[in-house]
Image: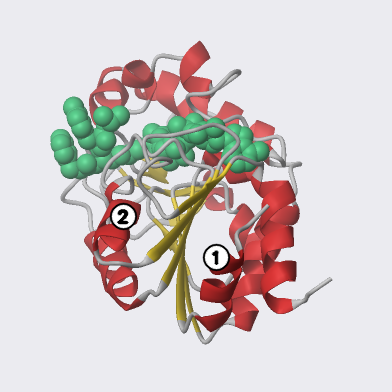
Amino acid sequence: MFSREAIAALKAARSVFVLTGAGVSADSGVPTFRGTGGLWRNYQATSLATPKAFANNPKLVWEFYSYRRKILAPLKPNPGHFAIASLEERVSSFTLATQNIDNLHRIAGSQNIIELHGNIWEVRCSSSTCKNAAEPWENCQVPLSPLPPLCGDCGGHLRPNVVWFGEMLNPAALSASMRAIQEADFFIVVGTSALVQPASRMPLMAHEAGVFVLEINPEPTELSKIVKESVQETSGAALPLLVEEAFAVQ
Ligand code: BJW
């Protein structure tokens, strides 16, 4: 499945960077966004995942994320998540940047995680002037009315701590990713259509800097013809094999 060159490069790597997208959680039963059965095929992204949508109809957007949490709650990490966690234990420097908001990498045991698009299991105040930090979603489950619940300090609507279209990513998350990419000598991009910026630029930056970029995705993407190696396979099947072949882990 993988070339000898890829396995040798991963074995020799001192610093590995992994970028994941919705496809990594697909094997756990989490719907992707753009593929068959994808969320954005059934819901209008612009009417749900933008600051404007929340300003226009905060209750609808809150309910959409409540529905998503209900889908996610019983789901478990899959072999792809576990292989990424296992890879982290085997290389001296490792960074995982995920576009996923589902927390499954953390549950699988990954440690050095950058959540580029936030975490659905956290909420924060939507007011730009409120100083309250994000807090666990469980803390605001009590009031069923009003929806969305209100911030205890400023009275603003609470919102999921995720990044919507047109919003800036957390600058600390972005700069930590950039630093890690500059250090990396092996880059794995897995389970993402690579259509959403700025995450989609990360593998290209690494490729342009001469880093070995390995893509894993059952479907071809914009990256497939550019990067050093593209393997058309699911992450749940390919990632455990990759770690096994590079580090002889069963
Ligand atoms: C498998 C598999 C298996 C299946 N194994 N693989 C015009 C107007 C406004 C903004 C823009 C604009 N033009 C550009 C922009 C910027 C915008 C953007 O990039 N838009 C593009 C769509 C054009 N980006 C932003 O707005 C970002 N902010 C930003 O850039 O700030 C600066 C700026 C601001 C304003 C204007 C311009 C610049 C923020 C992006 C935030 C994205 N948020 C979401 C929602 C999060 C919350 C939620 O979940 O509701 O994040 S959108 C959605 O897409 C989600 C994902 O993280 C993200 C990426 O999707 P991903 O992970 O790639 O999933 P899919 O479904 O696309 O692909 C799945 C892949 O898996 C497929 O390839 C399958 O083949 C594969 N697969 N099974 C492995 N078993």
Residue 181, position as x, y percentages in the image: 32, 69
Residue 183, above or below 62: below
Could you tell me residue 163's position as x and y percent? Answer: 34, 43
Q: Is residue 131 visible to us here?
A: yes
- Cβ(mark 1) to ligand 1 < 8 Å? no
Give x and y (percent) for residue 56. Answer: 26, 18
Q: Is residue 13 above or below residue 121?
A: below
Kind of residue at badge 2: Met
**Front residue (pair 8, 185):** 8
Q: Is residue 26 left or right of residue 188?
A: right
Q: Residue at x 31, y 55 (%)?
A: 202
CB of residue at label 2: within 8 Å of ligand 1? no
Q: Earlier in the sequence, mark 2 or mark 1?
A: 1
Which quadrant: the C terminus?
Answer: bottom right
- Label ID, residue 187: none
Q: Residue at (67%, 73%) from the top-left corner?
A: 246
The residue that label 1 is drawn on is: 6
Q: Among all residues in the image, which is located at the extreme right?
A: 250
| Observer able to see residue 69 | no
Q: Say what secondary structure mark 1 lies in.
A: helix
Q: Nearer the viewer, residue 14 or 132?
A: 14
Relative to the observer, which residue lies in front, 75 or 73? 75
Q: Amino acid at mark 1?
A: Ala
Of all residues, the one furthest to the bottom in this rendering is 92
Model colouring: secondary structure
Residue at the extreme left: 129
What residue is at 24 percent from the left and 67 percent from the top? 175
Which numbered disc, 2 or 1, marks the residue closer to the eye? Answer: 1
Ligand 1's image quarter is top left
Q: Which residue is mark 2?
A: 202
- What residue is shown at x 78% (from left), y 75% (from top)? 249
Q: Position of residue 76 (x, y in %)?
A: 75, 49
